[in-house]
Amino acid sequence: MALNDGKISRQDSDALAEALLGLESIEEVKAFLDDLCTPSELRAFAERFKVARLLDAGDLSYREISERTGASTTTVTRVARFLREMPHQGYRLVLDKLKTK
């Protein structure tokens, strides 16, 4: 996980990643996320992931994705940039793993 402006330690970031790795079912992940995040944070995560899936499918314009998801065109553009260009490649990793299931 990327460190956010120095306020979260690498140890804390790693602990969160380990916690997520330890979960064994969709229900466990949902329960943890429900406790960890606010409803608006969960909506934002789900929205960005839906945008990433639609971008990856390649069938819709940014504007169409914005209209379909309710995400701003700025969010669609940002997700597209992370999907294509950023070094973390987290969206790509997850999308590719889901394709092999």
Image (tube, helix red, strand yellow):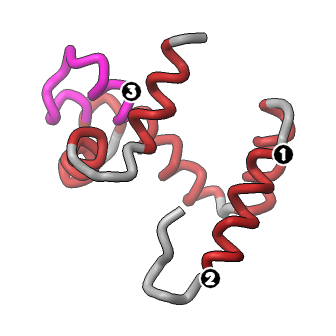
Q: Report the Cα–Cα distance between label 2 and label 3.
A: 30 Å
| Residue that protrudes farthest toward the bottom in the picture | 7
Q: Are marks 2 and 3 in contact (CB under 8 Å)?
A: no
Left or right: 42 with respect to 62?
Answer: right
Disc 1 residue type (three-letter) = Gly
Name the quadrant of the C terminus.
Answer: top right
In the picture shown, does residue 84 fall above or below 96?
Answer: below
Name the quadrant of the N terminus.
Answer: bottom right
Numbered tag placed on residue 9 in the rendering: 2
Q: Which residue is mark 1?
A: 22
Residue 13 in picture, x, y percent from top left:
64, 69
Disc 2 residue type (three-letter) = Ser
Q: Which residue is mark 3?
A: 53
Tell me the residue at 34%/41% (across/down): 70
Q: Is residue 72 visible?
A: no
Residue 79 in picture, x, y percent from top left:
29, 46
In the picture shown, does residue 20 fall above or below 83?
Answer: below
Q: Is residue 69 visible?
A: yes
Disc 3 residue type (three-letter) = Arg
Magenta extent: 51-65
**Sequence order check: which comes first, mark 2 or mark 3?**
2
Most common SS among magenta residues: helix
Q: Are marks 1 and 3 in contact (CB under 8 Å)?
A: no
Quick one: 54 or 101, which is closer to the camera? 101
Tell me the residue at 62%/82% (across/down): 9
Element under label 1?
loop
The local crowd at label 2, few if under 14, some if 14 to 19, many if 20 or more residues have their Cα within 10 Å, is few
**Sequence order check: which comes first, mark 1 or mark 3?**
1
